[in-house]
Amino acid sequence: MAQISLFFVSQDGQTEKIARTLSNHLENADQQVRLVDLHQGKISAQDIEAAELVIVLAAIRYGHHLKPADLFLKAHGDILCKKKLALLSVNLTARKLHKRTIEHSIYLQKWVKRHAFSPVLVRAIAGKLDYPSYGWFDRFMIQLIMRITKGPTDPSLTIEFTDWDQVKELAGELVELV
Ligand SMILES: Cc1cc2nc3c(=O)[nH]c(=O)nc-3n(C[C@H](O)[C@H](O)[C@H](O)COP(=O)(O)O)c2cc1C
C-alpha cells in the first residue's frame, strides 16, 4: 500500500468534489491517501516526504491556477523535484476531450514550464459552469470565453462538465505509478 498525498485547491467547490472522488477511487484501489486542502493553511513537509506520489489538483481562474497551488509548488520545490509528481488542472476548456493533455493545453504547458518539474503525469479535468452563481463581471467574462471557444452562453445555465469516467480512469493510471 503506497502513501499518496493529494493536495487540492478549489474556489467554488468543483475541484474539491473531484479531489474527494479521486481520493475515494484511490482508496478503493488499496492506496493510503492523505487529502490536503491548500486553502487550509500550513502544510507539513512530512505530508510530502512520506508520500510515494504527490498529486496537485488545482482550479483555473482567468488563465491561472489558484494561487495556493503555485505557492505550494514554489515553497516545496526542493522536495517535490525528487518525488513522483502528478499535476491535475480543473478548467472549462477541458470539456473538450483533446484539451485534456499537455500537447493541446496551453494551461498545462505553461504550468509545467513555470515550475520546471518533470511530472510523471499531467492532465486537465473539466470543471463546472455555473452562470447563476457568478457576479455580472465574471458572468460576462465567462460568456466571452465561451463565445470564443464555442461553448454555452445562456446565463441561466449550470452544467457540470466533469467527466467522472475520466476521474476513475485517472485513478487507475495514478495507481500504476506507485
Ligand atoms: C471567475 C472565473 C474565471 C474562470 N477562468 C477560467 C479560464 O480562464 N479558463 C477555463 O478554462 N476555465 C475558467 N473558469 C472555469 C473554472 O476553472 C471552473 O468553473 C472550475 O470548475 C472551478 O473550480 P472550483 O469550483 O473548484 O473553483 C473560470 C471560472 C470562474 C468562476
Image (tube, grey):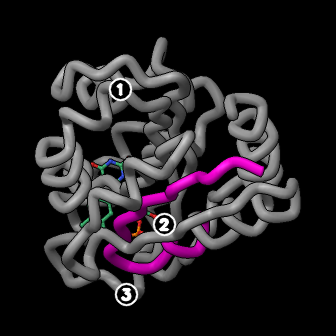
From where the camera sits, is residue 77 visible?
A: yes
Q: Is residue 42 above or below residue 127?
A: below
Q: Which mark is residue 133?
A: 3
Badge 3 or badge 2: first in the primary sequence: 2
In the image, is residue 98 part of the stretch drawn in magenta? Answer: no
The magenta segment: 1-18
Amino acid at dot 2: Thr
- Residue drawn at (78%, 51%), measured in percent from left and top? 1
Calculate the distance from the C-alpha at mark 3 to the C-alpha at mark 2. Answer: 16 Å
Residue for point 36% across, 59% down: 46
Q: Earlier in the sequence, mark 2 or mark 1?
A: 2
Give me the residue at 42% from left, 31% from top.
Answer: 83
Lower sequence index among marks 1 and 3: 1
Q: Quadrant of the C terminus?
A: top right
Identify the disc placed on residue 15: 2
Left or right position of 32 against 105 = right
Q: Amino acid at mark 3?
A: Ser
Mark 3 surroundings: few (<14), some (14-19) or many (≥20) residues within 10 A: some
In the rendered image, residue 2 lying in the magenta stretch gets the answer yes
Of residues 33 and 60, the one nearer the viewer is 33
Q: Which residue is label 1 attached to?
A: 82
Q: Does mark 2 have its CB less than 8 Å from ligand 1? A: yes
